[in-house]
Image (cartoon, helix red, strand yellow):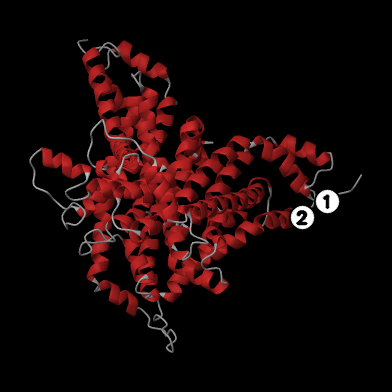
Amino acid sequence: MRTRTGGLGGDLGAPQHVVGWLLLLPAAVLLVTFTHYPAFGTLYHSLFSTPKTGRPAVWVGLDNYQAMASDPVFWQSLRNNVVFALGTIPTSIALALAMALLVNGQLRGRAFLRLSYFTPTILPMIAVANIWLFFYTPGYGLLEQITGRLGLPTHNWLGSRDTALACLIVVTIWKEAGFFMIFYLAALQSIAPVLGEAAAIEGAGRWYFFRRVTFPLLMPTTLFVLVNAVINSFRLVDHIVVMTRGGPDNASQLLLYYIYDVGFKFWDTAYAAALTMVLLAILAVAALGQFALLERRVHYR
Amino acid sequence: MTRPRVGVDPPGRVLETLAAWLLGIVWLLPLAYAVWTAFHPREYSAHFVPTAPLTLANFDDAWNAAPFARYLINTVVLVSIILAAQLVLCTLAAYAFARYEFVGRGTAFLLVLVQLMIMPDVLIVENYRTMNRLGLVDTIVAIGLPYMASAFGIFLLRQTFKTVPRELDEAARVEGAGALETLWRVYVPLARPVYVAYALVSVSYHWNNFLWPLIVTNSVASRPLTVGLQVFSSTDQGIDWSLITAATLLTSAPLLVAFLLFQRQFVQSFMRAGIR
């Protein structure tokens, strides 16, 4: 038999450390290269000018941030992003909860309904955007056909400053509600049916039961879904590439799409780095929320 | 009490069923619309008459109008290498976090969790710079590299490995198994459902991912389906909706069919992966 040292017995201290780090090493190298290093790289490059041919990057301090503060497109993209978040998050969470409550009960065609709510989640956002682009097409798309039947004037939904962002909000809600629904569904199924029976014997109405029992019990799920929805609203811009490209007049410009525009169309990488710092700051705030949540969950176990 | 009792509220029930179905139909409408357009000749693309003839010509035309076969292969290669790398890297790292006491473990774990918030999706400018320096721009590997060490996978597997009884681990050690052998023989088999869940979520995510692949690829040889679809529908031709919707459905079809066949597994996987 071969002899071995270390392992889990913990008889020797050193091999535990060595083996632990060796196991972690491959993942750690990639994480550092593509998460931590670029995060610091973003900060570093945001303090320099964008290198051009024959003109290397020079230290400019906070110039990029000053330019950002006086850049109306930046402020617009930030405002739009807040509107986008407020437009998508509460509605998709409320719809997700409603869907879950509906298909959790006894209902004709329950399996089919679950399927129809959840299917958008599986589709690529880029495909979803194509389908909806067609849906919104002026004069020809389904939406226009419906409004036309109702005798409403024709309207360029994606091409007009007043409606472009709202159109994107609708698409995002359609895509996300079914995804959030399954978390509520899982949570609902873990609520003991005894509670409902007890409430029924006590004569409590269904709305009363929902408000006083179900909803509070679903609170951890709501928090979890909320944090994810916030992150998604700053992370996902695929539909903008297809549907509006931030237009018209930046009316549907979101922060990450603006970063993409600045970084990869104008190749102003230093300014794109400064913009990314704002995005990272927003995500860091969401991170604190998530960590608080994880902490709680770990303690439960 | 005058309140109606739970369950004996027929008008309410009927209303609920109606609401559920209305929502279900609204939810399916955009997709049904795309299916209609893709399966009918162009003159019927937005003209809904039940007698319209069905056709597969749009799919044929779309498939031949752009190198979709190549895009499909690229996507399959992409999701496969990402998943393979994720499974290996995350298993090793999760094992270390779950069962080894090493210097800096707590800090290292927090640093891993950072990726849950600062995803590669938002570090596009810097990661492009890195890929450029590595000479990897316009390769399939470049699309996958930032996602291979997945904090989410590490976290999920660590939680699972922690539930494995230590006695099983020790028994394997007594029989002379080393760290990797114990991991392979004891932990991996016990975590199988979690691996399945993680794999489904990972494949769905990367099959659908778009922005980073759009940035880091610029040729047919490396483009995945999502980017190929965008190139096709925005440049390769005018606005022929029959073709575009056919291409759109083609792009989503493999995943959609898999989902329809294995609905329960999909839903449970997303649930398991999300709830952690």
Q: Is residue B136 left or right of residue B187?
A: left
Say which amino acid is labelled 2. Pro
Q: Quadrant of residue A263?
A: bottom left
Choose the circle earlier in sequence order: 2 or 1: 1
Frontmost residue, B162 versus B271: B271
Frontmost residue, B131 versus A193: B131
- The residue at which mark 1 appears reads as A5
| SS at circle 2 | helix
Frontmost residue, B226 versus B211: B226
Q: Quadrant of residue A253?
A: bottom left
Judge the density around disc 2: few (<14), some (14-19), many (≥20) Cα neighbours within 10 Å. Answer: some
- The residue at which mark 2 appears reads as A15
Compared to residue A211, the image places residue A236 above or below, namely below
Chain at numbered mark 2: A
Residue B96 x %, y %? 66, 50
Q: Is there CB contact under 8 Å for labels 2 and 1? A: yes
Residue B271 visible in the current orientation: no
Residue A241 x %, y %? 33, 58
| Number of dots carrying numbers | 2
Q: Is residue A211 left or right of residue A119?
A: left
Q: Residue furthest bottom?
A: A54
Q: CA distance from mark 2 to mark 1?
A: 7 Å
Residue B262 x %, y %? 51, 32
Compared to residue B253, the image places residue A274 above or below, namely below
Which quadrant of the figure contains the N terminus of chain B?
top left
Marks 2 and 1: same chain?
yes
Residue B236 visible in the current orientation: yes
Say which amino acid is labelled 1. Thr
| SS at circle 1 | loop
Compared to residue A291, the image places residue A268 above or below, namely below
Residue A162 x %, y %? 15, 55
